[in-house]
Image (tube, rainbow, N blue to C red):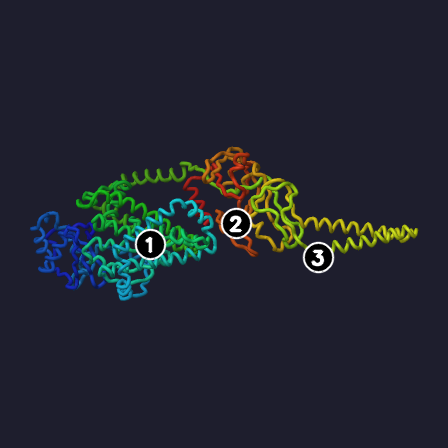
Amino acid sequence: MVHPEMSGDGVDSLPDYFPLRKDLKIWPRDDGTGRVNLENPTNGRFYRFGKLEHQFLLALQETESAWKSFEHCQRLKDGSSFSPQACLRLCQWLAHHELTELESQAKTPDLFPKHAFLPKTISSAFFFKLPLCNPNRLLKHLAEKLSWMLSNTALLVAFAVLIGTLISTLGKWEEFIAGYDRLISPWRFSVLAVAWVVLKFAHELGHGLMCRKNGGEVEEAGLAFVLFMPLAYVDVTSSWRFASRWQRLQVTLAGVVAEILIAVLALIVWNCSSSIVIRQAAADVVILASISSLVFNLNPLLKFDGYFALADLSGVDNLYVHGRTYAHSLGRRIFLGIRNHSRALPADVPGWVKTYGCAAALYRTLTVGGLLIAASTLFHGAGILLAVAGFFLFVIAPLRSLGASLAGLYREGSLRPFRLFLRLGALTAVVLGLLFIAPVGWNVTAPAIVQYSPPAIVRNQMAGFVETVHVSDGDTVLSQQPLVTLRDDDLQLKLRRQKKQLAQVQQEIRSAQWRGQSSELKDAMSRHEGLLAQVDETQKQVDQLVIRAPREGKVVSRRIELIMGTYLKPGEELAVIGNERSKRLKVSIGQREARQAANWRFNSLRILVEGHPSWDAKLIRLETRAGTSPPDDSMLVVNGGPLAVVHQASDEFELCHPRVNAYIQLDELHSEMLRAGQRVVVALPCKRPSLGRSLLSFIDER
């Protein structure tokens, strides 16, 4: 039913002259219930009516008299359920939506009072539409050319391809998920943006093509903005003319099907390609299509594709209205103690709508809260003002309406203020107890990186070109075993010149000794000592061109094979030599958690590693000062890690918030199990403050 609950006076209140507009169109439905859709060509809107309402409209078109049409309905089977009050409400609803030919629509009571004190611009900031074009002719041409793609056969073939692709990927899910280690890297933002635009365009194109294929009209397309984020849309309300619910379902689900087909193509590309870049881009398309289709478009709790599909499949008209009506009735009964004398739902509405209404109300509350938080976060100062305006729109305005309703009930004598205040006081006490009294404690996780203990970092002391790389990543080496040999021609030439000069001075010493010239001998001996020191120093520098392992262990380097022929400056890190049986965890802890270190630093902490059972270990050291220097490059978000950073000059990064480093020593068993450079998670048994205190802290930080 399309009319809301409202009290009426009876048959005498029904107007005698009440003509419907001549341009209204009634479209029957094939669900066997006698229900119809009424089209208003003026604004392109459609309204659903039940069987008795349909008979009333038909009689009204003939008699142009509301009370004669009501008498006609009373003579029909089940006509007794169409009460005078319901008929009056229907007439008022028709007049309010300007579906009659009355000269003054304003004489009819306004069933939907507007809040003049709330400007429409506030709601427009959260959602508004921008029509751009009329794609009807283009979609008609495309539907004719692509009719084979919209056939049932094509959909069955696509479904078979989907099943086959999923089966072929079953054994590769770990590899597929591994592609998201670097999901938040800079270059992938552009891929995600392009994929999102393509998916949304294909989604709306699917709606439009299927609507045109089934004979509907698509006279508007444009952009819808949610918190100023653009989303494409097409107007396919003409699909309400279709008598077949299956045709309406085809139009409703065509957008989701289009996204799934693109996801299938992307999954095929992922399976066939060997390029890491292409596979990551394909994986992005798959995950975006899956999330947008399953979480948003097919979600029936909001009025998207999933809602209209559920309404058509269940045959429940105005599902959203019925669910909201029941949720409001239940809320008034539980929180305010107000019981409705009339039924919250009509008798022909199934019981599951009650559950749907409660779930939709809860989801709407969370969605509105999320929008307000997002507005305050995304737009900084202006976002705070926008969030406050939204709070008045979504919270204060409904509370104002509720206050007016309670005042009316009080004047009627059906509301007892003392009982209401007592109930609200008890509920407030419970909420405050949950927020500020009941402690909330859970394990907080912190990211960590596996390191050798102690890590022996190999650096070159001399500059030079890499002439030879003697080892590879993962090789086991002995102490002082050569790793890399550098070449410095100038240094080698310098050493040869010094040795030549030394040989000449030695010859002078022998000549002076032979001739017995003591003064020349003394001078030559002095120069010999100086040259010998220079040769020794230069020889040490030449020896340092051969970079050797400082200890026995395993070579860990991601690029040691790639430095062949490159020029190295002094002090560059080439590799790490570590003992596989001696490793540690370097943990990055937030400042808030670090303040509670005294409560857990001497207790065992839980180590969580994907693919391995968890175990307990103790903290051996906690740094006393927090800093913004990254604990390890692999832990940064740009490299697929969890730590957010700010890009600085010279390709350096700085943590967004200061953090404290801590260290956990691993035993031999877990040291051999984990590889150096592997990311793990450490559970910290921190006692978090209550939810209310956390909320106040968040507001204070903002």
Query: Counting residues from the N terminus, which is met first, the one under dot 3 or under dot 2?
Result: 3
Q: How far across and how far down the image is residue 53, in percent?
A: 14, 53
> Around disc 3, counting alpha carbons within 10 Å, would you say few (fewer than 14), some (14 to 19), or many (20 or more)?
few
Query: Counting residues from the N terminus, which is met first, the one under dot 2 or under dot 1?
Result: 1
Q: Can residue 27 be seen by looking at this rendering?
A: yes
User: Horizontal placement of 379 versus 329: left or right?
Assistant: right
Furthest toward the right, the residue is 516
In front of the other: label 2 or label 1? 1
Q: How many marks?
A: 3
Distance of label 3 from label 2 (alpha carbons) = 42 Å
> Around disc 2, counting alpha carbons within 10 Å, would you say few (fewer than 14), some (14 to 19), or many (20 or more)?
some
Residue that numbered label 1 is attached to = 261
Residue drawn at 25 percent across, 49 percent down? 310
User: Horizontal placement of 660 versus 519: left or right?
Assistant: left
| Callouts 2 and 1 close, C-beta under 8 Å | no
In front of the other: label 3 or label 2? 3
Q: How far across and how far down the image is residue 196, in percent?
A: 38, 56
Residue drawn at 51 percent across, 33 percent down? 603
Which kind of residue does numbered mark 3 sit on?
A: Asp
Numbered disc 3: secondary structure = helix
Query: Counting residues from the N terminus, which is met first, the one under dot 1 or under dot 3?
Result: 1
In the image, which disc is placed on residue 490? 3
Residue that numbered label 2 is attached to = 655
Q: Can residue 375 be seen by looking at this rendering?
A: no
